[in-house]
Image (cartoon, coloured by chain):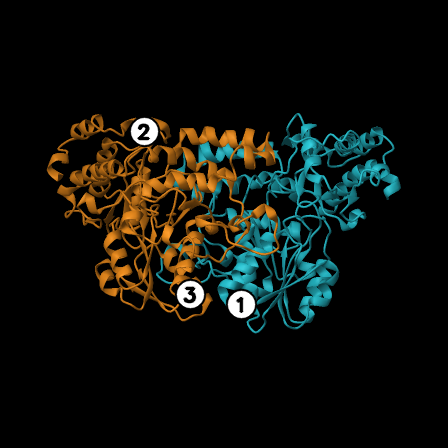
Chain colours: A cyan, B orange
Amino acid sequence: MRNQNNPSSRIHAEGLDRADPLARYRAQFELPSDNIYLNGHSLGPLPKASLARLTDVAAREWARDLTASWNTAGWSALPKRLGDKIAPIIGAPAGSVVVSDGVVTNLFKAVAAALALRPERRVIVMEGSNFPTDNYVVQGLTAWLGHGHTIRFVESDGLLAAIDPQVAATVLTHVHYKTSAILDMAAITARAHHVGALAVWDLSHSIGAVPVDVGTAKADFAVGCTYKYLNGGPGSPAFIYVAPTHQAAAHQPITGWWAHKAPFAFDRDYAPAEGTSKMLTGSQPILSMAAIEPGLDMVANILPENLHRKCGTLGETFLAALDPVLDGFGLAVASPRDPAKRGGHVALDHAEGARIVWALAARGVMADFRAPTTMRFGFSPLFLRHVDAWDAAAALIEVLKTRAWDRPEFALSATVT
Amino acid sequence: MRNQNNPSSRIHAEGLDRADPLARYRAQFELPSDNIYLNGHSLGPLPKASLARLTDVAAREWARDLTASWNTAGWSALPKRLGDKIAPIIGAPAGSVVVSDGVVTNLFKAVAAALALRPERRVIVMEGSNFPTDNYVVQGLTAWLGHGHTIRFVESDGLLAAIDPQVAATVLTHVHYKTSAILDMAAITARAHHVGALAVWDLSHSIGAVPVDVGTAKADFAVGCTYKYLNGGPGSPAFIYVAPTHQAAAHQPITGWWAHKAPFAFDRDYAPAEGTSKMLTGSQPILSMAAIEPGLDMVANILPENLHRKCGTLGETFLAALDPVLDGFGLAVASPRDPAKRGGHVALDHAEGARIVWALAARGVMADFRAPTTMRFGFSPLFLRHVDAWDAAAALIEVLKTRAWDRPEFALSATVT
């Protein structure tokens, strides 16, 4: 496969673009005219339809119809409607997913529910190198609970062995935020179930880039973000999945009125809603919720395998162009070389990674950096061309050849995931 | 005061409008042309500047500048920047308020933090008739904690007596969602402190309508909503206040990376941020966050006493017009008659309240209904005129005189707070 896609020139990349069945989606985004945007793994670009949708929500639904829009414009139904569009993308049945709150809050709810379903167990298995917010959530939750839970931090090669009968739950991210390596959800979940544990999955770097099948894998809970490969807008609300087998017994603690079985009865006392609705909290930020839908609709109409295939050919185009120079410039590929085992982005390590990312930005190639040495190049499948991947690699080679990064103005600076 | 403002005719209301120092703000809103909107206590209307702001956030900050906007457009700073604008409105010092998540999640965090500061105590005092989501949150939190907490439900006249040394915290809403009655924050908080308890306040129906001074009252925690009298947009994120005395010791359990002392160090383990930042969770919905600011800026420039005074004169205009017919039509005023003791809305009870609200809507007067018998008429001070209050009362009288509500199509239907 590497040979087949190995571009000997930019012309080869142009050929891949001409044959690309997803090429037509690029025109559906507002893209910056002056750069190649390889940060879609952090914040997806604006779908043109989202700007129109947002204007309509503000100028018509909010301004003109006001409170009536909770019903007439379907605001009240958004958590479920968006959830039902996400469900088939991750292999979940209708009604098992809702969109609400952020990834952090949803992970808190999912892990809280999982631990309550395994009250006799005190160990949680996590990948220590995971995006740390997931660690922080579980650390905060368990410290506050005060039941003596401990987190067993292991890396991917030790995961299966670490899942023993002490384990209440595994809490793992399907695609690694740094390396882009894909964990084997089915095998890990099966191992968890074999010892009586539950499996909670963070799909933030998966949905819209990598096939996911929580149903076949029998995942117990899952959460994920909508602003990366779903292009839902900055900080857009997150989703949460509860396996049908747990929907009756699972409970989360943030029980606002949207999690009540009859919110408009205004009963004094809490009674849980049916199914995944009990994972809701209160009113959701409608402007940000509504802006999710156009990007989600695009992804929902494409087979996840086709999205992942294009992530792969974009990444291969990039890596094939770099291959001849990797060693000479002190670059190391931190992601799996097999595109089938890699998510949407490609990670490269370099001792001067931070400054290289800034030098690339000065040349119109937008990537990001994760300390201490990792550069991430996001190959979002809907709006990028293979020539973009080729041009980005050429710019990187140029930066390395000319040591363009070696300037005081390219100092380390923070960027957001 | 009642006599002075008692309009004997619509002309008197017009005179109040001519003398209204807040009259100029009406032009800053997009208002429906065909009705009188008295649901600002539920969802404030669209500030014209918010539509422009929203378009700019989407078309420039998101579409053009993308991830750079977390820094260059100040997205990362929004929770604190909005919080610092809210702080003086509620009598809080700079740095003690952040905007993040929803009221439900923020109340969960505040109550969790308060209970953890009083680990030996097991009683929480709440008003049973409060908007039930607050009850649900505390019920869900305490049930799931499993430490044997109980909620002592009392009504306003029994609150002070119910606060005894068993009490860990009072969790009360400053302005009642149904009756609009204002609780005495200073007296209740003082009583709580006298017995060693903490006071958590929900300011959802207060901010932008009623003066609040959490500093003078020595409130321990407060939360509140931005989509009512702040006009921040449907479901816009909420605020949370932590008294400076608690900022070191207080901890909440939903500890995402925005609550970490160094989020971009990507340390494996959680370490709390300083001050109120530890009340944050993860990335916030930026479109909904940004839309809060124009409405907030308007309120921030007006003395809360002036906002409350106008709520009062609007409500008095409405009630004075209704006074002669109240008894004859079976209407009862469910709110305090003294405008100094009333929030932004006026509640009327009627056995056919649900159908009356629908009949009013058919006549272009938008109010809402809370089961079993309460109609709420919101007198938002920034965009309503005294003639609107007078005209709304006239429409209500007409509906009652003609029994226009007595039609099958005006059946009970749910509306959102």
Give the numbered dot on residue B142.
Answer: 3
Query: Looking at the image, is A258 positioned above or below residue B399?
Result: below
Question: Horizontally, is A331 left or right of A121 in the view?
Answer: right
Residue B316's spot in the image, x, y percent?
A: 19, 39
Mark 3 or mark 2, which has the lower sequence index?
A: 2
Q: CA distance from mark 1 to mark 2?
A: 51 Å
Q: How many callouts does the rendering have?
A: 3
Chain under numbered label 2: B
Amino acid type, mark 2: Tyr
Query: Looking at the image, is A138 positioned above or below residue B207?
Result: below
Q: Is residue A367 something that shows in the picture?
A: no
Q: Residues within 10 Å of mark 1 (few under 14, many from 20)?
A: some
Q: Which residue is mark 1?
A: A116
Does dot 1 land on a helix, a strand or a loop? helix
Q: In this view, which residue lies farthest toward the front? A: A408
Amino acid type, mark 1: Ala
Q: Residues within 10 Å of mark 3 (few under 14, many from 20)?
A: many
Q: Quadrant of residue B299?
A: top left
Residue A128's spot in the image, x, y percent?
A: 66, 57
Q: Which residue is mark 2?
A: B25
Residue B59's spot in the image, x, y percent?
A: 55, 29
Q: Same chain for the residues at labels 3 and 2, yes or no?
A: yes
Callouts 1 and 3 close, C-beta under 8 Å: no
Q: Same chain for the residues at labels 1 and 3, yes or no?
A: no
**Residue at horizontal 29%, vertical 51%?**
B174
Q: Is residue B177 something that shows in the picture?
A: yes
